[in-house]
Image (cartoon, grey):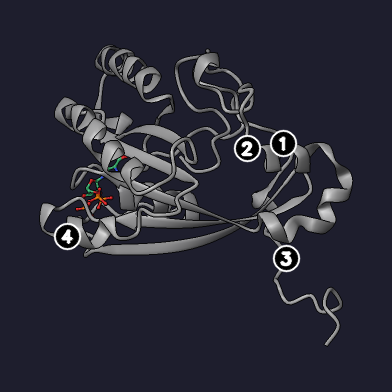
Amino acid sequence: MESGKLCVSAPVSRDRVVTRFPKWYTPEACLQLKDHWHVQVRNACQDRSARNVGHRLKISKVVVVGDLHVGKTCLINRFCKDVFDRDYKATIGVDFEIERFEISGIPYTLQIWDTAGQEKFKCIASAYYRGAQVIITVFDLADIRTLENTRQWLEDALRENEPNSSFVFLVGTKKDLLSAAECERTERDAVRLAAEMKAEFWSVSAKTGIDRGSTEQPQGRGPEGLACC
Ligand SMILES: Nc1nc2c(ncn2[C@@H]2O[C@H](COP(=O)(O)OP(=O)(O)OP(=O)(O)O)[C@@H](O)[C@H]2O)c(=O)[nH]1
């Protein structure tokens, strides 16, 4: 069979067609402004003919790590299914979701690995860290100890990958549980840690979601336009 003649993939849903990027939380941590975007991605975005070689960019592996109960599964469920479940069901080992996008005309697939935070599953989960283009370290904004622990989670995930091969995100969850003042204090600590980690920081609530269309949030107050939370 001739390649290129058969279109097997379903169309990307409308809310997964990205033509506009979210505003950054801090310019220092903003991926779009970095000089070192992966060269393949940068070239593909600049070169319209790259649309025909989109298959080479097809899958990015994302691993989501962090302490137990911080909200990793809920974050992924909000992102992928736009739902929130208040009942806690511990992840056993790992789980994964596939999400298809079109970004500036380029087809793009995310393979999102949800890992267990419980110590007893750590060796199962860590077997899936290898080959991660994106590492998302998650903490609970209402439990500051989980922020400190993200250092160790990141170190473990980076150890399984080539140096400088992964984009790193630091995500604080459960924003709905904090007052504005408490949230601001924790976010300040998180921004400092994100700078150390060379990570992009987001502060979110999987429970409430966000006002997707809002442009009212001043910089540093929330992830406007983040497709998930
Ligand atoms: N209020 C609030 N609760 C949340 C939020 N996100 C998660 N939760 C709750 O926190 C608990 C843990 O959420 P999970 O997503 O299962 O946590 P996890 O990090 O995947 O846990 P493990 O699988 O054990 O690693 C659940 O009871 C959720 O309902 C949030 O944004 N706001």
- Front position in the image: 125 or 182: 125
Which residue bears the numbered disc 1? Answer: 42
- Foreground disc of the pair 3, 2: 2
- Front position in the image: 77 or 124: 124
- Between discs 1 and 3, the one toward the N terminus: 3
Dot 3, how many residues are within 10 Å of its Cα: few (below 14), some (14-19), or many (20+)? Answer: few
Which residue bears the numbered disc 2? Answer: 38
Secondary structure of the residue carrying tag 1 is: helix
Which residue bears the numbered disc 3? Answer: 11
192 shown above or below 93: above
- Between discs 3 and 2, the one toward the N terminus: 3
- Residue 89 appears in view: no
User: Mark 2 and 1 residues: CB-CB less than 8 Å, in contact?
Assistant: yes
**Which mark is on residue 121?**
4
- Front position in the image: 18 or 50: 50
Q: Position of residue 116 (x, y in %)?
A: 23, 55
Q: As shown in the figure, which amino acid type bears the numbered disc 1? A: Arg
Kindly indicate the quadrant of the structure image that contains residue 34: top right
134 shown above or below 201: below
- Foreground disc of the pair 4, 1: 1
Q: As shown in the figure, which amino acid type bears the numbered disc 4? A: Phe
